[in-house]
């Protein structure tokens, strides 16, 4: 399995006057306890339109076992008025404006953890990828 590396770089010379911001973070993502990388579970492009249905399912939760996964979603729209709402289990996580993206962990073991997206402002074009780890999360104890 290929090595999977996630890298984020954030910089600004004028976010706070007199202070330069420079954040660089990188992490190799591997299956728990192994030296092998993650598996690509699903990837694709989506075109979502304003209107009915208002929320579109991007990724179904399996509901079989808790597992650690990573999700990448990018709103590739170029019109600044085309935004995408990201929802899990009827909870709004946030909005992606045109050209913005997200990278987040996702547990698809809960059937209610489906990832849904909703277009705001016009037809949004998204690209997405879901990476799967073979890791099963431990059962919670009371």
Image: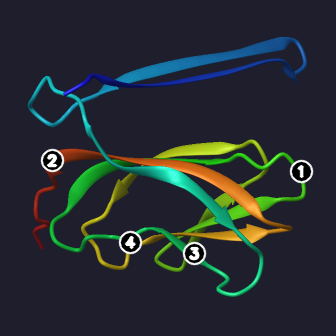
Is disc 2 placed on a helix, strand or loop? strand
Q: CA distance from mark 4 to mark 1?
A: 29 Å
Q: What number is the disc on residue 113? A: 4
Between 56 and 8, which is closer to the camera in this rendering? 56
Residue 33 placement, left or right of 83: left
Task: Residue at 74% x, 60% y: name it.
Answer: 124
Q: CA distance from mark 1 to mark 2?
A: 38 Å
Q: Which residue is mark 2?
A: 135
Q: Is residue 12 above or below residue 53?
A: above
Q: Position of residue 80 (x, y in %)?
A: 89, 51
Is disc 4 placed on a helix, strand or loop? loop
Q: Position of residue 122 (x, y in %)?
A: 84, 67
Q: CA distance from mark 4 to mark 2?
A: 17 Å
Q: CA distance from mark 4 to mark 3?
A: 14 Å
Q: Residue 56, located in which quarter of the rendered image?
A: bottom right
Q: Which residue is mark 1?
A: 80
Q: Earlier in the sequence, mark 3 or mark 2?
A: 3
Q: CA distance from mark 3 to mark 1?
A: 21 Å
Q: What number is the disc on residue 56? A: 3
Please rate how many residues cluster around mark 4, counting C-alpha atoms within 10 Å: few if below 14, some from 14 to 19, many from 20.
many
Task: Residue at 74% x, 72% y: name it.
Answer: 49
Residue 59 placement, left or right of 22: left
Residue 139 placement, left or right of 63: left
Q: Which quarter of the rendered picture does the N terminus lie within?
A: top left
């Amino acid at each position: 399995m290929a090595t999977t590396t996630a890298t984020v770089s954030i910089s600004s010379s004028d976010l706070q006057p007199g202070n330069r911001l420079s954040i660089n973070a990188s992490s190799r993502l591997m299956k728990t306890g192994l030296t092998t990388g993650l598996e690509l579970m699903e990837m694709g492009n989506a075109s979502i339109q304003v209107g009915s249905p208002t929320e579109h399912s991007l990724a179904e939760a399996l509901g079989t076992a808790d597992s650690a996964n990573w999700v990448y979603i990018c709103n590739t729209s170029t019109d600044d008025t085309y935004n995408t709402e990201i929802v899990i289990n009827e909870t709004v996580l946030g909005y992606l404006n045109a050209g913005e993206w997200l990278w987040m962990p996702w547990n698809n073991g809960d059937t209610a953890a489906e990832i849904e997206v909703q277009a705001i402002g016009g037809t949004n074009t998204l690209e997405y990828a879901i990476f799967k780890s073979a890791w099963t999360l431990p059962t919670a104890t009371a």
